Image: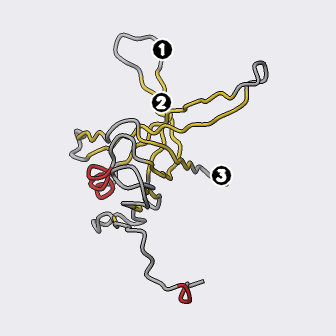
Amino acid sequence: MAFGKNHAELVGRLGADVTVNHLASGGRVANLSIATDESYIDRQSGERQDRTEWHRVVTFQDGLIDMLQKHATKGRLIHVEGKMQTRRWRKPGEDSDRFSTEIIVVPGNRVQFYDKPNGNGAAAAEAQAPMNDGGAGQAATAANGADDFGADQIPF
């Protein structure tokens, strides 16, 4: 029996607006480019260094693609859950394979924006890929930062 866990989670900024392409099968695919930053102290110089890592994110979920087309614009702060997957292909006339590691947003994963479209404030949109994509579509909700519960009615 095989076991393991393939879970990737990112919080970063979109490097470009979402791109949506149509597949020969009639479906669609959305591609995101997310930048994550980290800082560290260089051992030799003792100075603070910043490093940016770029990540490719892909989804085939129709409802999620619709939400991303409305809200996923360059610079937005986004949280993405998915699984890592590496594709391999070869271009015609080349002797070696090419590889691309991507985070695939599959049913049950989440995409959430942590800012408003103008770049500040609480989350503006959230979506979760449905567990069963039986044509039910994608759940996307607008969050305005207001709680439905009073301070004495917190459900936990």
Amino acid bearing label 2: Ser
Nearer the observer, 26 or 64: 64
Amino acid bearing label 3: Gly
- The residue under label 1 is 96
In this rendering, the answer to whether 136 lies above or below 29 is below
Q: Earlier in the sequence, mark 3 or mark 2?
A: 3
Residue 86: % across, % down: 51, 35
At 41% across and 37% down in the image, what residue appears?
33
Amino acid bearing label 1: Ser
Q: CA distance from mark 3 to mark 1?
A: 30 Å
Callout 2 touching callout 1 (CB < 8 Å): no
At 78% across and 19% down in the image, what residue appears?
44
Nearer the observer, 20 or 51: 51
Nearer the observer, 26 or 146: 146
- The residue under label 3 is 4
In which quadrant of the rendered view does residue 113 lie? Answer: bottom left
